[in-house]
Image (cartoon, rainbow, N blue to C red):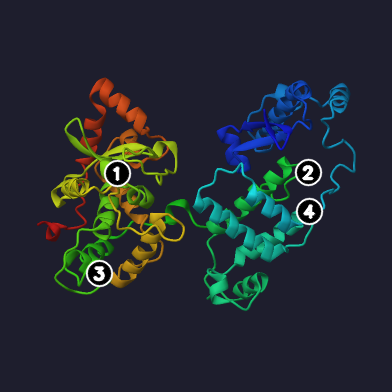
Amino acid sequence: MFVRNGRFYFRKTLPADVQRLTSRTEVWRSLRTDSPEIALRRLPFIVAQVEADIEMARYQAGLTVDDALLRPFSDDSGRRVRNSQGLDVVPVTSDAQRPTSTLTLGAAYQRYLDDPTHSWTQSTRQAYETTRAVVIAAIGDDKPIAALSRLDVRELLEVLRFLPRNSSKHFPRLALREAAKRAGADDTITRISTANANAYLGNFSSFLNWAVGEEIIHRNPARGLRLRDEVARRDKRHPFSPTQLKLIFHAPLYTGCADGERGWDSQGTQRPRNARFWVPLIALHTGMRLNEICQLDVTDIRVIEEIACICITRTSLVGSTDKKLKTNVSERIVPLHRRLIDLGLVRYAEGLLREGQTKLFHDVDRGSKGVRAVAFSKWFTRFLRRSGASQERTSFHSFRHNFRDELRIGRVEHELAMSLGGWVGGKSLASAVSESYGYGHRVAALHDAISQLHFFDIDLSHLAR
């Protein structure tokens, strides 16, 4: 229970399974009072109501539920108690679903974006703002949010289904609906992926869930709506082929270029050992995500039990404030592959440390969004095109797929593979460290697993100095 603008509220973090069902991490309920005594009396009823809502979400998804929690106030006596406490926000009448809020969709969305309780990263905020722009363009800024219907959301879904990629760039004079209509009639126009369309729907649904929690609307009309993804999960992204890997690591940047800044795609005599050189190599040999690599501190290259490792962690020994990870299991230890050591990665980190640098790749621009990975990803896309390695369904993330394939080829035990890649089912850094220092085997076991990876598909002997 907490106070906001002089009123008492109850907030609960949702269980993980319900978070996946509702696209929400927590739920808020107003206690409708500024009196702590009244709030405390009403609290048990609100808690029970929230627990019932959680069980209802599970019930509607076909999961096992606790009947005792499902309808705690379903009988007449329960409703009388709730009415006496002023807690019946949706009376059980045919008029209960009639919209009452006079807020427009645009105004409500702005309140959502301005809500100070959000703990969004800059990239998350940008994603929600982009979704808002798409929704407003498709539905309209002035539509009363309380009048928003399931039909409105289905019409939005149809727009997203045919929305051209980079619509405003390719069709600057067309409204969003018109651009989608044109793309729907022309199969040569590239559309956004189903995954992106569903991401927009998910973000919009999160906003509507917030509006329900704020008692602006009674229900979420977008709940459960998704486009069916015809692309199989394993076909969404591919690893780089041996031919692509050869083109990447035999490009001028790796064989001799004009310079490492602007002349990286031209033949020359320079052999820069900068972020552009190291980041793809680290990704291939560790399976690390792009942002995990770009945000590394110099001190994240450490020796643990006489084994050189990369420590992927949110914490910083040098005061960095830009370190974020995708999940808890993303925090992990990855012993360095022998090839990275031979190429001089440890020496590179030690040299930066002597120079007083704090970031391992300080030369990566943070860009307008303040995220190094965004700027590097844009450069790497250009690099793939210039090197001739660009193909459908491959991107920087393909290195992670190559790494996973190598783990399979090396027959690395599943649990160790999950730990090395930071995949669900692996162990976090804290767990790995505790096992390492408690039993003396964990880092050594990870090192043994990394040693099983040979990367026979790519010859990097030309990089040796």
Where residue 85 is drawn, which disc sits there?
none
Mark pair 4, 2: CA separation: 13 Å
- Disc 1 designates what residue? 408
Left or right, 351 with respect to 56, comes to left
Where residue 264 is drawn, which disc sits there?
3
Circle 2: element type: loop
Q: Amino acid at mark 1?
A: Arg
Q: x and y percent of residue 28 in the render? A: 68, 36
Where residue 218 is drawn, which disc sits there?
2
Kindly indicate whether the residue at mark 3 contacts the one at mark 4 (C-beta within 8 angstroms).
no
Q: Amino acid at mark 3?
A: Trp
Q: Earlier in the sequence, mark 4 or mark 1?
A: 4
Circle 4: element type: loop
Q: Earlier in the sequence, mark 2 or mark 1?
A: 2
Q: Nearer the viewer, mark 4 or mark 2?
A: 4
Left or right, 168 with respect to 81, comes to left
Circle 3: element type: loop
Q: Which quadrant holds the N terminus?
A: top right
- Disc 4 designates what residue? 103
